[in-house]
Image (tube, rainbow, N blue to C red):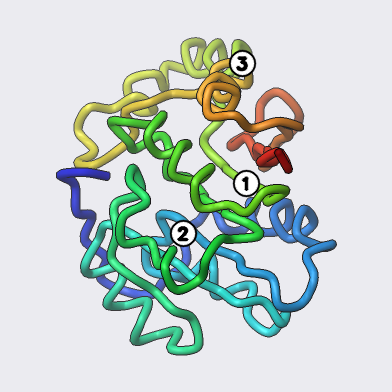
Amino acid sequence: MAGISYVYRAADKEPSHDYLFPVVKKLLEQTPPGAVVYDLGCGNGSFLSLFQGRGWRLYGSDFSPTGIEIAKETYPEIEFCLADAESPDGCLLEEIGAADVVISTEVIEHLYDPRGFVRTCYTMLRPGGRLILTTPFHGYFNNLLLAITGKMDGHFTVLWDHGHIKFWSKKTIQVPLVEAGFVEIEVSGAGRVPYLWKSMVVTAVKPMH
């Protein structure tokens, strides 16, 4: 998130973790011990910490100095670094080589350059590696409900510093993934009932060749 440094004050989890974690956990069920799992845009490390004890090598990076400081202090078993999610520079690639899984929860909607972010994810993954990406869902029925209930201004507020600047639908989120070279793209939902989801959970694979 070039130019933006979100300030974290504690290691508290985000409310979205309650409905995102079960979905992401299920998608990671077949990940073998020893796999490199990297959280790009990890914030204070609280989401990545939920996967400790599974025999994976856990890494995380974020552009927030306070987030990384809290993550390092709170979860010393995980390796964290300060890095821009829109560029692979500084993402521990020299140390880890390549990731088996890159996860990123509720990050891409904050970014000025989401295509650069997706290319970073692609670069970080080994051939055959998997991206798991979440972002708030914006579909027809969601937007219609916001309009009917008079909550449009609150949802799309311009008064949230460092808030959401990109609003993704099931169709649009696939575009930068295809452009970057990802295949086997699948989109599911998390939170609430189908098509009124709070977030989309997107999976994509870096091809073997």
Q: Percent x, y for residue 151? A: 41, 22
**Could you say which quadrant of the image residue 162 lies in?**
top left
Q: Quick check: 14 left or right of 98?
A: left
For disc 1, the neighbor class at 10 Å (few under 14, some 14 to 19, many from 20) is: many
The C terminus lies in quadrant? top right
Mark 1 or mark 2, which is nearer the start of the sequence? Answer: 2
Identified by mark 3, the residue type is: Lys
SS for dot 2: loop
Residue at 47% x, 11% y is 147
Q: Amino acid at mark 1?
A: Leu
Q: Is residue 162 above or below residue 164?
A: below
Are there few (<14), some (14-19), or many (20+) residues within 10 Å of tag 3?
A: few
Quickly name the residue at label 2. 14
Per the model, the C-alpha gap separating discs 3 and 2 is 26 Å
Residue carrying label 3: 171
Residue at 57 percent across and 58 percent down: it is 17
Helix, strand or loop at mark 1: strand
Q: Position of residue 164 (x, y in %)?
A: 34, 33
46 to the left or right of 169: left
Q: Amino acid at mark 2?
A: Glu
**Residue to which mark 1 is pinned:** 131
- Residue at (44% x, 73% y) in the render: 95
Real-space CA distance between mark 2 and mark 1, rounded to the nearest whole angstrom? 21 Å
Classify the position of the N terminus by image quarter. top left
- For mark 3, give the secondary structure: loop
First of labels 1, 3 by sequence position: 1
- Residue extending furthest toward the right: 30
**Which numbered disc, 3 or 2, marks the residue that appears first in the sequence?**
2
